[in-house]
Amino acid sequence: MEMEEYYDFLMSSCPGIGNHRAEKLYAMFGSSKGAVEASVTDLVDSGILKKEEGEIFYDHVRSGANYQAYCQLKKDKIQLVSVHQKAYPTRLLTIPNRPYLLYIKGELPKEQPYSVAVVGARTCTQYGETMAFQIGRQLAMAGVNVISGLAKGIDGAAHRGALSVEGGKTYACLAGGVDLCFPREHIAMYEEMSERGGLISEYPPGMKPLAKHFPLRNRIISGLSDVVVVVEARERSGSLITVDAALEQNRMVMAVPGRMCDKMSLGCNQLLKLGAGIVTRPRDILEMLTQEVFHEDGYGCYRMDEEKEEALRCEEQSLKEQEKVKDHSLLHSLSAQEQMIYKVLDCTPKSINQITEESKMKIGMVIEALVSMEFKGFVKESARGSFERLL
Amino acid sequence: MLSKVYSASILGVEASIVEVEVDMSNGLPVFHMTGYLGARVREAEDRVKTAVKNVNHPIPSSHIVINVSPASIRKSGTMLDLPIAVGILADMEIIRKSALEEFLIVGELSLDGKVNPIPGVLAMVHEAKKRGIKKAIVPVRNLMETELMEDMMIVGAGNLAEVIDVMNDDDALPVGCPRSSEGLSGNEPDFCEVKGQEMAKQAILIAACGRHNLLMSGPPGTGKTLLASRIPSILPRLTNEEMIEISKIYSICGLLDHSSVIRKRPFRAPHHTISDVAMLGGGAFPVPGEITLAHRGVLFLDELTLFRPFTLESMRQPLEEGEIKVIRNGISVNFPSDLMLVAAMNPCKCGYYPDRSRCRCTDYDIKRHIGHLSKPFLDRFDLMVHVDKPKYQELVWEDVEEAEACKELRILKDPYSSKSMQKVVERVVAIQKERYRKEEFSYNKDLPAKALETYCVLDGEGRALLKRAYEKYSLSARGYNKIIKVARTIADMEGEEYIRAPHVSEAIILRNLEESEM
């Protein structure tokens, strides 16, 4: 078995041999061992490889460097799962262009009960980030695997949401080797996920996350999930590639709506128009999973253990409470001036000049109110000189 | 026969008095010049001989030796033509020798005897005054720049014949120089012409009050240059000494345009392709660079990220010290560079960040864009303000004629007209002068860290706010001190002794980029 894994590694790490041809070689020679040990003539005669490709393959599988790389891989506790192994995710088996070999740091998502992908823009607004966090959090509470791409913005917020729950599991599909953290800013999250969840890639360790890999890894994100949820996508967004892949793979697509005029949510709204499921609260996703409307007192046929159910209900309750507390403190902890400024603000950033003009207040007072509200946690300086409401 | 004439030569931004000794004797006809002279000085020979001949005083064939002392300093330029000619004429007993030691004589000669203008006349006359020389003969076209020199008789000479007359007879020419129209002309750029942009104007006002360096960031075409060019109009008015100081520099660089002295604070906006030497000063014979031309005024660096890193880095030290020492060919000169630095840049490559509906730059792109600037250079800026796109209403006056008609009124009423702002600046500068009378510095910008506790006392609320800001933005110690300095200026603007929370708030909003944001 051990050797078979090494042969799989040799086959899939060979430059120029894609998933499709790796599987063909496997079928032709009966095993990866057979393919690796085949002579150039056999390889070419099989009609799968051309002469030069056959030679490259032949040389590659016999090069000593591979064994060192393989040992390093084992040392780094990176698992390999090929398409012929039982451990290979069943959801991926049926997708077009399925990866021949998966490299995994951490673990693969459990098959049961559900996995949900949360994807969206890297440059997102406060609104998108909050929504992604809440969705990630509440899905994790319900025991659902949260899958995304470790990118900045929405992806990161969804992962963070899932990790904020005790025992929450979240998985990232990477566009480079699983030993590389991209973007680097997410290194803490990357470390945590290798313990609580997993990092998955079809590229061998050491492979840089090249631009052309990203659309391809999107198919694994959607392939591993039952539902793809899009939070904040612009009209032309990378998230829409994930959606295309999801539709091709017969997955459900849901989207978080944005305002009509909001460019940052144009892609989401477009999806909704085309018939995607609408997410007005995280529970909508669970409903979509089970195709059944939950009753207020239970979760229908999707059997969550009582503990999780209770936790989820508490979370929803506490969010409502928070909302109330905010309304309350809005009235009491903010001065009259601060309240006026707060009303002018929005969940899209506004510059100080704009705020001054709209509130018809003196610039000094506006600044004082903004800084004080920022410390109280009502507003956020999204970029220098621009403020937005915190949700 | 020997005669001595006082003249002057330029070194850096100062002149030094030199003696031109001319000796004429019988012997082989030669014209010999000594005294560490540059090529331009040596060319005087032919000009002088011809000019003297053409004013009807042919030089007899004789052995002429000219020495310019002190012979240890290098002389360059054409200002010695006239003194050499005068020396020869004195030797020929056409000019009386007793008059020679009363006068400073500078000027370039043309072949027909006309006296041509030269750079640096103001500095030369100024130096002569210090040395106790009471009379000066300068080219007539340089006369205007000496108008601020009091207690001196300065004669503008049009040609060599006039010089001979003046030296032989004090009453030959009317004394006194034409005064240029004093006061400022009406078409000064004024802040009230810029609509909106209150935040930026406020930041500029604060910067001008405490002489803080200011960084403006914003999309292209939002008026950053427009705003910066108006900053000199709100700085305190120049004193006579300052005018002479600045005019001397401009005179040496030949930028006075043969007109009057500089009465306005300079505003220099060099292009970003500028070389190090043009920025800092230098050259085979050292001439001032942009930082010296902006002395006592504003140096504006537009498109800051496009300047070559080395140019910016080498500006750090002169900005700190207020002067730069330039050494070339064994000549060492100090150029002053006490200025207010204002810079503008786009926040990212496309310029629209943080407007995410227009800017598609990645975080990495944005970091790389700002990364062109080094942290130590950015540290020179105490304030940073984001200038954003003006609204349409801000862009146009509803009624152009009405706008013109009530301009006078606006200037009076608008808190952000140059006049109102200048009043504030002058008041705050006076407050600082008074407070720092025992110190070596006189602006809040220069407050050293150890003096912060003495001069920047915060009230309880202000202190609490500052503490929270320190934690929230993970400020560096330097960033923290800068916020206090700026808050000090804001408190001064309101005439308050203690720094209160609103002052701190404003300083926080205007804080410079921190390391964590780069």
Image (tube, coloured by chain):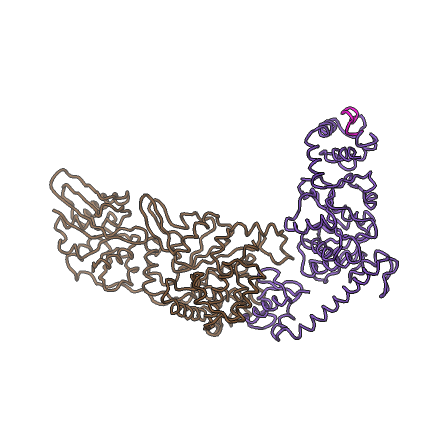
In terms of depth relative to the viewer, which is nearer, A382 or A135?
A135
- Count of numbered labels shown in the rendering: 0
Residue A179: name its quadrant: top right
| Quadrant of residue B176 within the rendered picture | bottom left
The spot of residue B416 in percent (x, y) is 49, 69
Vertical position of residue B105 compared to residue B415: above or below: above
Question: Looking at the magenta stretch, what is its main secondary structure?
Answer: helix
For residue B388, what is the image quadrant?
A: bottom right
Magenta range is: A34-44
In this orientation, which residue lies closer to the viewer: B56 or B143? B143
Q: Which chain is tinted purple?
A: A
Could you tell me if residue B381 is visible in this image?
yes
Indicate whether A49 appears above or below B254.
above
Q: Percent position (x, y) of residue B435?
A: 39, 69
Q: Which chain is brown?
A: B
Along the horizontal axis of the image, is B93 left or right of A178?
left
- Would you say residue A297 sits in the magenta stretch? no
Percent x, y for residue B230? 46, 63
**Looking at the image, which is closer to me, B249 or A256?**
A256
Percent x, y of residue B71:
22, 45
Is residue A219 shown to the viewer in this render? no
Q: Please state if B360 lies on the left or on the right of A245 as rendered.
A: left
